Amino acid sequence: MEDNTKNLENSNNSERIGNAEEECFETIIGLETHVELSTRTKMFCGCRLSFGEKPNSNTCPVCLGHPGSLPVVNKKAVEYAMKIALALNCRINKHTIFHRKNYFYPDMTKNYQISQFNLPIGIGGYVDVNMGDYTRRVGITRVHMEEDAGKLVHSGTTGRISEADYSIGDFNRAGTPLIEIVTEPEIKSPLEAKQYMITLRNILLYLDVSDCSMEEGSLRCDANISVKLKDSEKLGTRAEIKNLNSFKFIQKALEFEVSRHISVINSGKKVIQQTRHYDDKTQSTKALRSKEEAHDYRYFPDPDLVPIDIDESWIEKIRDSIPELPNQKEKRYRDKFGLSDYDSSLLSGDFGISDYFEKALKAYDANPKGICNWLMGDFSAFLNKDQISINDSKIRPEHLAGLVKLIDDGKISSKIAKSVFEEMYFKGSDPDEIIKEKGLEQISDEGELESIVEEAIKNNPDAVSQYRAGKVKAIGFIVGQVMQKTKGKANPALVNEIIIKKLS
Amino acid sequence: MELISMKAHELHELIKKKEIKAEDIARAHIERIEETDRNINAFITFKPGEIIENAKKIDRYISKGGVVRDFTGIPISIKDNICVKDIRMTCASKILADYTSIYDATVIKKLNAQNYLLLGKANMDEFAMGSSNENSAFGPVKNPWDLERVPGGSSGGPAASVASFEAVCSLGSDTGGSIRMPAALCGVVGFKPTYGRVSRYGVVAFASSLDQIGPFGRDVTDCINLYNAISGHDELDSTSLDMKDKKDHEYKSGQGIKGMKVGVPKELMVKEVDSEVKASILNTIKILEKNGADIEETTLPSLEYALSVYYIIAPSEASSNLSRFDGVRYGYRDKDAQGLREMYRKTRAAGFGPEVRRRIMIGTYCLSSGYYDAYYEKAQKIRTLIINDFKKAFSKFDILVGPTSPTTAFRLGERMDDLLLMYLSDICTIPVNLAGIPAISIPCGLSSDKLPIGFQIMADTLREDNVFKAAHVLESEINWKITPKI
């Protein structure tokens, strides 16, 4: 998981670097995102969804496209699609149908993909993307359901089917429920595109409808981009960049495209409408052969499937199942917990961290701010250093909560807490046990502290006389002596109090 | 009485009384097939050894007290576009010549539950496209009444196997008349149920919105029983009807037709209908009248467009349904092709016969962007008009009647060079599929050259009972005893 703040800052810098010439142009981006749903079974048959299992082990006559087999819609997938559509503020089409998208390719067992066309499940929504100093509202044109293809591995060194002696197919993925989310062309920069994807992914994670793993391809997107002169009414010619599967690639590919379009326009040439592919090795995009894009998909309603009619009560049932979403969480963190705008936004803006935060709150809800400070401070720093996500950390949320409670109860000082935290981070142990084992519990016993304070006063007459002479700060030296003696375990506030009492 | 000339319900009584063994019935039919099928060519896959083994198994099951159902031990031929697990299924096409089904169609599961006896896979027009059974990669089927003539199509094998006493009953599929038309030409009973009554799971799709599996038999009772055996809601087919919330009109035999309202659409008595056929149909209508039915001529104006609509919708759906046959995962593949595109092209060019290729091209054209609205979408609109015409007619009539086929069996090769004439063979049956209604064809007479004529009875959606009522009355009145001499 990426740290949003850091990237926001970096990119702001890079935007400031932009030269005056670029400022004459306007970029317009639309994204089509594909999400693999995490239902138990496939979209149109009863096969289990699997990842990394033996090739073709989860297949049947339906997903293998055997003669005579018929698709049956997975109701759960429809509900997940409704959930997504509603969370993206879409209207649900109460009469929704499946179309066939016809094209020949060996990863598509029927040589048509069951998809949606003119009556998708969701239409007309939006997502608010937090850009730090402004919010970009991105319109959602449509949310539709379809099925994924199988995977092909081509022999030979290039990995291309045209240069392979043979190819082998794994159809475990064939028929996996896919949701396509299409935005309006309302994204104005590569950075906005990336932030939109981060926001979308976060919402999807909250909805618990997909694992959203970009490495495994369960979340990927195609980007349409065009560039025009700012004062020109006419839209620029668009290029489509296929299959962008990381936040970084989305931004880099689009940044490359922006400069490519600008230099084409500046050279007096015309941008050609084409499909391109991003190569991270060269950090540039390349046009796919035009032959590969000359498709007439011959869409028509799939006669094997009956229309899905959705009534109001079904919609309400799904609406009720939607958990609190990031923007609602942000508001609650701010209003109810009194967290700063900055903290609320960061906490809610990352499903993993927010989920962790809420779990910690379940264990100890008296000091949300205290838990938040650890999450945003030391904890984040450690995670960043190790480049791991919070879910991979050894510290359990209830242990972090326990640590905050120990501080709040005056059982340990915040200085000790830092070392306890380190122990927790590296070993995953319970803070209660750590302080017990190492005897780190704060000394708040007045009698015990009094004798230590008395000893310190006796051994440091200089400091005592300075204090009595009106130099209040000298008390700090004596406190330091006590802390040293107690190896930092003494309750500093109490020590302070005793010293003042003894010296007055 | 000879075993092979008996109906399923007659054999059933004997099996139930243990007066006869499934094995004896099987042997009699195997003998018959071996004697006649070299002329008829009704079977693509026929394995006598396995049939005997299975018949013996059924006998053991019966002797152990197993329940004897309507089709327990009854030899049935299955059209070769219906999946039977571990049995070759060719669809009469080179592209599937060596394909073995990996699962049972729902109708086969239902028949297996009754312990039926599979006789073999029956010949057909390739992928059910044709009206004469001449489009088979396994050679044409001959009409048992005259070996120079076609049995009709596309279920020519099922019809001919039942007409020639090779099989007691058969299952076919009907997309535009593919059960009723060959039933008419072969002098047997063939029934197409309401769309959605019988699961399509496991029948190789030709035109999904039109396809329906149905029975062939030598009498109406066998067809009704076989229909009852295979019908019912199936979760594996979204288009199969769930009768949960619907009223089902159950048919009880012996219900007469007194007061039944019968419409005779003039659009089905078109100029293409042969005069002898017409005379026989009018004669049969008189029998209905004699038995108390009210006859009235009527009109369904949109039927004029049925054939045109059909030849847009069916090929369009077929062009997509048949795209899975590409040589990649199963079936025939051109091994010498270089590269993916050439492999697709050569495999499909050599794997499909001319009629299938023609319909794939028509369908691909109709669905292409720029043509979709003018063809496919418009055809769907007219299909709705046809449905509405039938709805209107059935608000007035219990059944509609007319010829099944405009002519009797034509000569082999006669229409192969005149495709429009060939397509016109289905002019009386196609409207039924477009409307999704049930219809039966029963033999009603012989032409002067001793060829059977079929009478078609149609009813409203889910009103199979009305079809059966009229068919039963006519059957007993006509008392059809004539059989082909083969």
Image (cartoon, rainbow, N blue to C red):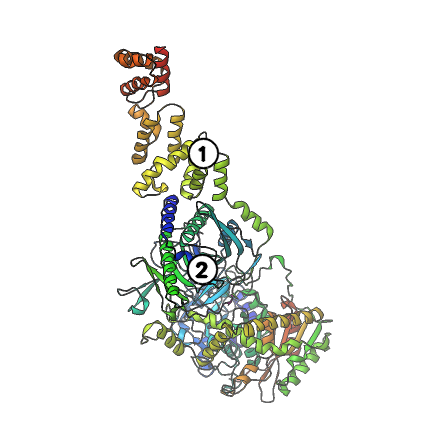
Location of the C terminus of chain A (image quadrant): top left
Residue at x 47% of width, y 70% of height: B320
Q: In this rendering, is residue A129 above or below B227?
A: above
The amino acid sitting under disc 2 is Glu
Q: Quadrant of residue A308?
A: bottom right
Q: Chain of mark 1?
A: A
Q: Residue at x 36, y 73 (%)?
A: B341
Who is closer to the viewer here, B226 or B402? B402
Q: Nearer the viewer, residue B162 or B108?
A: B108
Secondary structure mainly formed by the magenta segment? loop
Query: Closer to the observer: label 2 or label 1?
Result: 1
**Circle 2 Cα neighbour tier, 10 Å, few/some/many (<14 / 14–19 / ≥20):** many
Q: In the displayed image of the protein, which residue is found farthest to the front?
A: A20
According to the image, label 1 marks what residue? A362
Q: Which residue is mark 2?
A: A147
Q: Identify the amino acid type marked 1.
A: Lys
Tell me if I can see residue A1 in this picture. Answer: no
- The magenta segment: A295-301
